[in-house]
């Protein structure tokens, strides 16, 4: 009965029982099983509006999604239309103006190479597989963030379909409150169909990784944390302990090995970069890949997994690192990673969005792959120990790294939260849109 009244989207609706149902409802984290009422696969903004109008009339909610990299916070999708925007694949680069316009389904991998050819770089993060929309709506911390801040604040315009089905453009001159809310408030206000953003001139930079045997993890983290106060904001470094799986996606020398790794990107010369990183190099890495490189190298410097996998994740923004506890947790977890924060991430710029800054000196993140019940128990235990050790040092949360349904009021200062709720009340009073971290209408 439903299908008879469904709008005719170019790419269609997928309903339970359809042969492509399992594929259409799948996301990036294979431990999570999304069960929406239906999945819409629009091909353009008109399709998006038709799907939103249909869902509203049917009494469903609408959950926008691009890649499913942050599906956990959505929780139960009963009575919800999963609106998958991955068909919106427009990409336009204006190198002279240093501006990019992309459809809401575009992943960073489609943009970094084109920008690189013009000596430009976007403020992407660790994985080329992440969608620009979800990343930008929640904040976006990447290799250039200590110098240039979060991607959310590099956005110059969004186009989106509102709860009443209207397609609008938001920028500093059009619906400025909505433009403010979208830059940090996530998918709570409508379905974004296109994003425009600024990119930065980066021809070459000093970047790479120092790899150490995992037994040196404690020494590496001690040296790294001691060095942080002396690093300029042109240098972004991440320290990780990684158990690399023995799969072809992993560079050959690291395949199947456990390694402690410093990765960094320095917007400056090789001589400066070498000087700044000298205390870490003095520890004697087993491999050193640093060199002057074009910005495209940042796209997979972190060697993130590109294919969906079953995992549990935890994180915290902290002011200090309990090194011994982190090394202990790393024995069970596939990845523990620490990103140097501060610089432009801690500085509010005029005209910034709702996610203007992030607190903390370090963004700590841990991920455990869950293959069965036993590994699930072990990962839960290690994540629990990781969280407990970080608790005394916690400065806040980074919502894009929060993987379960949460009370989002804790992610914002009280005045920002109140304003977000008022904007939500004005543009989505019936709470049609289920964003990755729920903001209820005022
Ligand atoms: C492997 C991996 C690496 C990561 N690396 C980084 C990193 O380096 N830096 C960083 O900051 N974050 C990183 N993240 C977190 C990432 O920023 C979030 O998971 C982000 O939400 C992903 O966006 P997405 O569109 O790919 O995912 P999705 O799950 O598709 O989207 C996440 C949410 O964004 C909203 N959304 C997406 N598209 C739309 C739309 N068109 N309209 C309205 N709302 C929309 C929805 O609320 C949706 O629930 C990483 C995550 C993973 C899994």
Image (tube, rainbow, N blue to C red):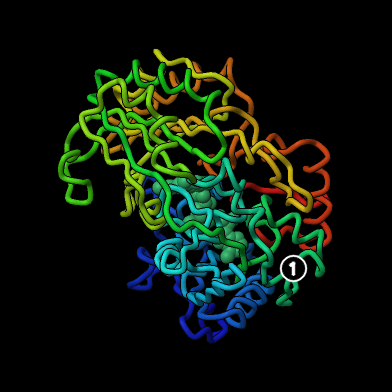
Q: Quadrant of residue 348?
A: top right
**Above/below status of 3 relative to 360:** below
Q: Is residue 46 left or right of residue 163?
A: left
Q: Is residue 78 visible?
A: no
In this view of the protein, which residue sits in the foreground, 105 or 358?
Answer: 358
Q: Residues within 10 Å of mark 1 (few under 14, many from 20)?
A: some
Extreme residue in the top direction: 324
- Looking at this view, is 233 or 133 the one in front? 233
Along the line of sight, the residue nearer the viewer: 74 or 217: 217
Q: Residue at x 53, y 24 (%)?
A: 230
- Where disc 1 sits, the SS reads strand
390 vs 111: above or below: above
**Residue 87 picture location, percent across and down:** 47, 75
Residue located beneath label 1 in the image: 170
Q: In the rendered picture of this protein, how many numbered marks are placed on residues?
A: 1
Task: Say if 409 sits above or below 45 in the image.
Answer: above
> Where does the image place residue 192, in percent across and percent down from the top left?
62, 67
Residue at the spot 62% in from the left edge and 80% down from the top edge: 50
At which x and y percent is residue 204?
A: 42, 54
Relative horizontal placement of residue 150, taking residue 421 as reference (left or right): left
Identified at 48% across, 18% down, the residue is 226
Q: Is residue 17 left or right of residue 10?
A: left
């Amino acid at each position: 009965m439903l299908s008879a009244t469904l709008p005719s989207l170019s790419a269609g609706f997928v309903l339970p029982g359809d042969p492509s149902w399992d594929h259409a409802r799948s996301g990036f984290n294979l431990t999570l099983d999304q069960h929406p009422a239906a999945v819409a696969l629009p091909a353009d903004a008109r399709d998006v509006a038709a799907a939103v109008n249909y869902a509203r009339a049917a009494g469903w909610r609408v959950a926008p999604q691009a890649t499913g990299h942050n599906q956990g916070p959505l929780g139960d999708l009963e009575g919800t239309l999963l609106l998958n925007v991955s068909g919106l694949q427009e990409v336009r680069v204006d190198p002279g103006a240093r501006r990019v316009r992309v459809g809401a389904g575009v992943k960073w991998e489609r943009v970094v190479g084109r920008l690189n050819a013009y000596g430009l770089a976007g403020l992407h993060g660790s994985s080329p597989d992440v969608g620009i929309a979800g990343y930008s709506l929640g904040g976006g911390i990447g290799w250039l963030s200590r110098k240039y801040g979060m991607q959310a604040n590099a956005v110059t315009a969004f186009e989106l379909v509102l709860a009443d089905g209207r397609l609008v453009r938001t920028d500093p001159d059009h619906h400025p409150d909505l433009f403010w809310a979208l830059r940090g408030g996530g998918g709570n206000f409508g379905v974004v169909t296109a994003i425009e953003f600024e990119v930065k001139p980066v021809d070459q930079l000093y970047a790479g990784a120092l790899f150490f045997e995992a037994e040196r993890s404690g020494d590496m983290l001690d040296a790294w944390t001691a060095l942080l106060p002396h690093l300029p904001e042109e240098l972004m470094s991440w320290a990780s302990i990684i158990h690399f799986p023995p799969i072809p996606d992993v560079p050959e020398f690291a395949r199947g090995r456990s390694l402690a790794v410093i990765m960094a990107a320095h917007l400056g010369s090789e001589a400066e970069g070498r000087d700044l990183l000298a205390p870490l190099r003095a520890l004697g890495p087993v491999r050193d890949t640093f060199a002057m490189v074009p910005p495209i190298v940042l796209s997979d410097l972190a060697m993130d997994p590109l294919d969906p996998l079953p995992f549990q994740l935890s994180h915290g923004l902290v002011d200090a690192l309990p090194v011994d506890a982190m090394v202990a947790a790393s024995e069970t977890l596939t990845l523990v990673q620490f990103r140097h924060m501060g610089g432009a991430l801690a500085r509010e710029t005029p005209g910034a969005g709702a996610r203007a800054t992030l607190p903390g000196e370090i963004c700590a993140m841990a991920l455990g792959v869950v293959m069965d019940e036993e590994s699930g128990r072990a990962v839960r235990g290690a994540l629990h120990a990781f969280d407990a050790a970080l608790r005394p040092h916690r400065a806040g949360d980074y919502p894009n790294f929060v993987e379960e349904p949460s009370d989002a009021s804790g992610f914002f200062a009280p005045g920002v939260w109140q304003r977000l709720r008022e904007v939500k009340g004005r543009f989505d009073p019936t709470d049609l849109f289920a964003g990755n971290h729920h903001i209820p209408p005022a």
